[in-house]
Image (spheres, rainbow, N blue to C red):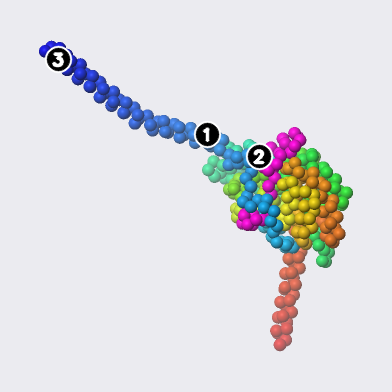
Amino acid sequence: MMMDIVKQRRLMVALLAGALAVMVAGCGTEAGLPLMTGGYGSGAGHVSAASGSKDTGKPEQADGAGSGVQPGDAAVTDASLGSGGSGSSEEVAAGGQADGTDSNTAQTDKEDQEAGQGAGVAGAGANSGQAEQAPAGQTTTGGQSAVRLDPPTEANVAFVPQQGQKLVALTFDDGPDHRYTPDILKVLKEQKVKATFFMVGTQVKKYPDMVKEIVEDGHAIGNHTQHHANLSKLDDNDIKQEIKSADEWFKETIGFVPHLVRAPYGAVSDIVKDVIQENDRELIGWTVDTRDWDGASVEAMRKNVNKNTHPGGIVLMHSFGSKHLGNTVKVLPLIIQDLTDKGYTFVTVDELLAAKELNAKAKEAAAQASAKTNQAKTAKS
């Protein structure tokens, strides 16, 4: 009998201990989950904020980029001047020109491979995810500085085209470097032709001697962003930061801020257009893509330019960003000779813009004169 009571007591104690263990375990799980979730979530958010660059280090190419489809004929008043031209996101998607360079091919020599990492990869700059302290007079949004662009300080270009003159502008993107840029400058000097170089900030920083030579030779320059970023995928602040960072290197190297801007890949958005317009810049596209970056042959590029160049046209080439640019150096004198034989005059994009403005003013004056003449005729009748 006593044994039965002891067994019952032991059984009861065991049951009570088991129930108590279950209760403790249950309370521990429920109380521990919020702590674990909160701790993990906070930690993940902190890591993301510290390393959360919007740029993955590989510039994305816009839809339709490098399609090879040429936009329509251009004139001095073509949309390629001032409004982004064939660089608009709609036109790119529809098969317009897009500038795909650094992310597609790499330099074969070690020097330019290292340089390419700066031109095509966004490092610790606008997209590093690190908030900067706002300078005096600037506001902050979400912990990030509200970037303000300095006004362009480049001298105005005085250019008056001759009546009926056929103008064309040669442009070179992504440089400079020490491999192809010197050869391109040599050809241009020998042919007595001025061109326009849209330069990436990281390249300006690395090759200031080439930037100075380009300016000293009388060529025009333009901002091609700091890291060859796809501006169409950035917000207002990051777009400005990409432009401003490059501006700083231009100021340090040559003493002024250029007013020409070309969007990498030709990819723009309404935000990009607004930023450019609000900051007294000119967004420049192109009308002929030689596809030199993609390995187009000398013969193919020569045929392309001859077929698709029209008065007021802008030809896209590169001075850095591809192992194929030896063909650019080879085709350049041939293109210059072909277009010269057709009666073209080579000008910088600045000069093309000046010609566009003069043409617009001439048309406006002619329209006003015509209106006055019609009013006089009406009054007499």
Q: Nearer the viewer, mark 1 or mark 2?
A: 2
Q: Earlier in the sequence, mark 1 or mark 3?
A: 3
Q: Which residue is mark 2?
A: 121
Q: Position of residue 246 (x, y in %)?
A: 69, 44
- Residue 281 lies in magenta, yes or no? no
How much space separates mark 1 and mark 2, taking CA atoms?
21 Å
Measuring 60% from the left and 41% from the top, which residue is drawn there? 55
Question: Which residue sits at x=88%, y=49%?
Answer: 190
Q: Position of residue 293 (x, y in %)?
A: 73, 46
Residue holding disc 3: 4
Judge by depth and name the residue closer to the eye, 9 or 140. 9
Q: Residue furthest top?
A: 2
**Disc assigned to residue 47:** 1
Q: Are marks 3 and 2 in contact (CB under 8 Å)?
A: no
Q: Is residue 208 visible?
A: no
Label 1 secondary element: helix
Magenta residues, as a range? 88-117
Q: Within the image, what quadrant is residue 336 found in?
A: bottom right
Q: Residue at x 84, y 51 (%)?
A: 333
Q: Horizontal and vertical percent for residue 248?
A: 70, 42
Answer whether residue 101 is magenta in the image: yes
Q: Amino acid under label 3? A: Asp
Side (left or right) of 222 relative to 5 = right
